[in-house]
Image (spheres, rainbow, N blue to C red):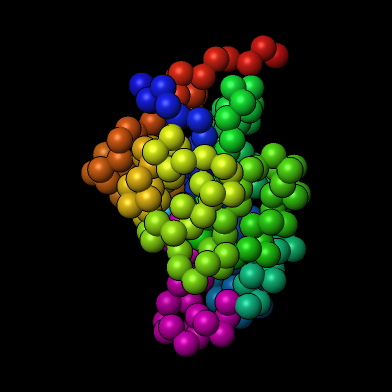
């Protein structure tokens, strides 16, 4: 069980709170059609979503090299911005988990490597912009996860001490960032995982569902 001192929870976004792979894949399909390239299988793309947009592009355009991927990136992000939130949904149990956190009076926030203009617009579209006590995106600071600085900044914005906070993510870099920042860490085994084994990341706990995380945090169920 989580320490009784816990009073706030920070989350990764894509693959932890939101299943955003369908829209990221849809944008890639459009770009593949524009470039005359067959789109890769969906599962191939879903597996690398946590690595960011360049990794998604590499699934279809690896032969073009780093310079070619960089040239494709602005168009891909524009396509994704247009499709964003059409099929993106919170993972099963996430809305209930956030409700339980809020009912306890805890702050919750987001630390993502996603670009800020996409992060804030996505949160606006799904109705979370006013609920998150802190949002630190991939370009908020000069560094990204696994550097601990974004996590520590989110703690300051949310008004919680690192020692009293939990960081939840579906990628090893999330666990690394949380550990380096001094937070209790949770590996979200329901997420994308980037093909890795979350039990090998050194997190304080591995949870296989948002409901299980709520139990571990000792949160009371919210009446419906």
**Residue occupying image coordinates x 75% and y 50%:** 124
Residue positioned most to the bottom: 67
Q: Most extreme residue toward the top, as rendered?
A: 223
Residue nearest the viewer, comparing 21 with 13: 13
At x 38%, y 61%, the residue is: 147
| Residue 197 visible in the picture | no
State whether the magenta stretch is mostly helix, strand or loop.
Answer: helix
Left or right of 78, for residue 135:
left
Q: Residue at x 45, y 37 (%)?
A: 165
- Return the x and y of residue 221 as percentages of the image width and height: 58, 15
Q: Is residue 144 magenta?
A: no
**Left or right: 198 as drawn, with respect to 52:** left
Image quadrant where residue 55 sits? bottom left
Give the position of the C terminus as an image quadrant: top right
Residue 146 image offset from top left, x and y in percent: 38, 59
- Residue appearing at x 54%, y 49% in the figure: 156
Q: Is residue 154 above or below residue 219?
A: below
- What segment carries the magenta color? 48-73
Query: In the rendered view, would you say 63 is above or below 153?
Result: below
Q: Quadrant of the N terminus?
A: top left
Where is residue 198? Give x, y as percent: 31, 42
Q: Residue 223: where, in percent of width, then height?
A: 67, 12
């Amino acid at each position: 069980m989580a320490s009784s001192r816990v009073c706030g929870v920070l989350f990764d976004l894509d693959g932890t709170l939101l299943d955003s792979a369908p829209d990221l894949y849809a944008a890639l399909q459009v770009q593949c059609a524009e470039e005359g390239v067959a789109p890769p299988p969906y599962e191939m793309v879903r597996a690398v979503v946590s690595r960011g947009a360049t990794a998604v592009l590499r699934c279809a355009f690896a032969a073009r090299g780093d310079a070619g991927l960089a040239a494709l990136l602005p168009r891909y992000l524009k396509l994704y911005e247009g499709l964003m939130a059409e099929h993106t949904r919170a993972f099963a149990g996430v809305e209930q988990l956030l409700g339980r956190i809020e009912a306890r009076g805890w702050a919750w926030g987001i630390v993502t490597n996603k670009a800020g203009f996409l992060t804030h617009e996505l949160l606006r579209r799904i109705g979370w912009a006013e609920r998150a006590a802190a949002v630190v995106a991939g370009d908020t600071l000069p560094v990204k996860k696994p550097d601990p600085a974004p996590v520590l900044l989110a703690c300051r914005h949310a008004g919680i001490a690192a020692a009293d906070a939990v960081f939840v993510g579906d990628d090893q870099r999330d666990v690394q960032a949380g550990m380096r920042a001094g937070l209790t860490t949770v590996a979200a085994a329901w997420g994308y995982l980037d093909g890795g084994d979350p039990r090998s990341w050194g997190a304080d706990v591995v949870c296989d569902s948002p409901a299980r995380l709520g139990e571990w945090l000792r949160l009371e169920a919210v009446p419906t």
